[in-house]
Image (spheres, rainbow, N blue to C red):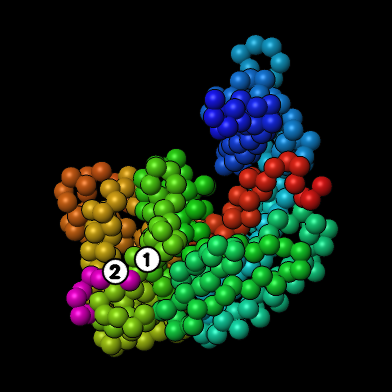
Amino acid sequence: MSAQARGAGSPARASATVTTLRQQNRAAALRFVLQQGETTRADLARRCGFSAASAANITSELIDDGLLAEVGSVSSRGGRPISLIAPRAEGAYAIGVDVGERGVAVELFDLSLTMVDREFRGGRHDETPDGIHRDLVEAVAALRARNQERWPRVLGIGLGLPGVVETGPDGAQVLYAQSLGWEPWPLPRDLDADLPVFAENGAKTQARAELWYGAARGIDHAVVALLGRGVGLGVITDGSLAHGAFSSAGEWGHTKINVGGARCRCGQNGCVEAYLGADAILHAWQARGGSFDGSGWQAVGALLTAADGDADARAVVDDVVEALGAALGSVVNLTNPERVVVGGWVGMRLMEHRSAQIADAVRRNCLHRLGMQFELVPATFGGDTVALGSALMPITALIDTPRSELFAV
């Protein structure tokens, strides 16, 4: 018998296997309850493939750890009422951050993923990485000052970032934000002395939020588009978010829809973002004589409102819809999704005013059969989606943490 075969049957290995299986079951149960919001032990057993006894034991353990709670009951067909279990909101907290080129929105969520506090920094002008770093440190410190009793149970800080986030073998992460003209930026770990920092591309954190709680929930194959100043995409395949070899999968904003076309912020020509980013859209309206205040939510809203009665504004919006149809039509051909979700603050504005026209444009720009197989829907969470999805990174780390290491006790 080989050493490998002897080891496979050893008591130590068997014990490790049992421990690993117990942790996997615990993680699956906690994830399920967090995603459901409220459930029963019987439903947990059925959906996770546990025995009734295992479901009861795992639930009791998670209640003892302060992560779940009994929150009421429902009537049964006979006998005692059935207890409902749910996340214990104050059992843990996570910080999610939407990082943009002009500032940060830093939000504190409880374990039910309800936002309990938020802090903004910046917002008026483009900033440098050093400025963003300063914003983050100040905003986190402000949240800590207001939430001192909660802070010992804050799990970490998740950052949703405007660019490609790569993780090295040592766990260090670097942001590559070519469109912003930034040099590669090693992501800071000193945002709070006690909290770990997690990071991901903002379009992916939006997609994660929609996958857990929103318009992509329960969907095995979906794409989630983010349209703001930048443009990005999260691709969901077999119920999981695609990352690619080095985490840059979904850089849809820099695929080309017009060879040699409009100049993009990334320095190339013809990119999706050069036609669908907020600055590009408003520049096109300005070139046709449009006037507006600012360059954000209200300015894009003014364009869409003006399009109801002004021919030039209507032509700009029609061009945007056609470009979006071409860009998403190619995505449909590549990924064959069941659902196409459009989010980001520009995307939400467009869906409010032109959802049927957008759906028609996408179907005209993909193969007929594939165009019959998806539905187009708006994102669920609006402006908070990136921050919510970012908070799910420390929440996911909690789910995967062995009980012996929970809260370092």
Q: How far apart are the alpha carbons under marks 1 and 2? A: 7 Å
For the residue marked with disc 2, what is the amino acid? Thr
Q: Residue furthest front?
A: 1
Give the residue at mark 1: 251
Q: Residue at x 37, y 66 (%)?
A: 251
Q: Is residue 252 left or right of residue 33?
A: left
Query: Which residue appears at 25% of the width and 43% of the height?
Result: 373
Q: Residue at x 28, y 57 (%)?
A: 331
Q: Which residues are magenta?
A: 254-261
Residue 258 drawn above or below residue 2:
below
* Residue 169 appears in the picture as rendered: yes
Quarter holding residue 63 = top right
| Residue 182 among magenta residues | no
For label 1, count other residues whose C-alpha is less than 10 Å away and answer few (under 14), some (14-19) or many (20+): some
Q: Which residue is mark 2?
A: 255
Question: Tag 1, which secondary structure?
Answer: loop
Q: Give the residue displayed 39% in from the left and 60% down from the top.
A: 249
Q: Could you say which disc has been placed on residue 111 in the image?
A: none
Please provide percent x and percent y for residue 218.
Answer: 44, 40
Q: Position of residue 98 (x, y in %)?
A: 56, 67
Of all residues, the one furthest to the top in this rendering is: 78
Residues at circles 1 and 2 in contact by the CB criterion of under 8 Å: yes
For residue 363, above or below residue 11: below
* Residue closest to the eye, 100 or 82: 100
> What secondary structure characterizes most of the magenta part?
loop
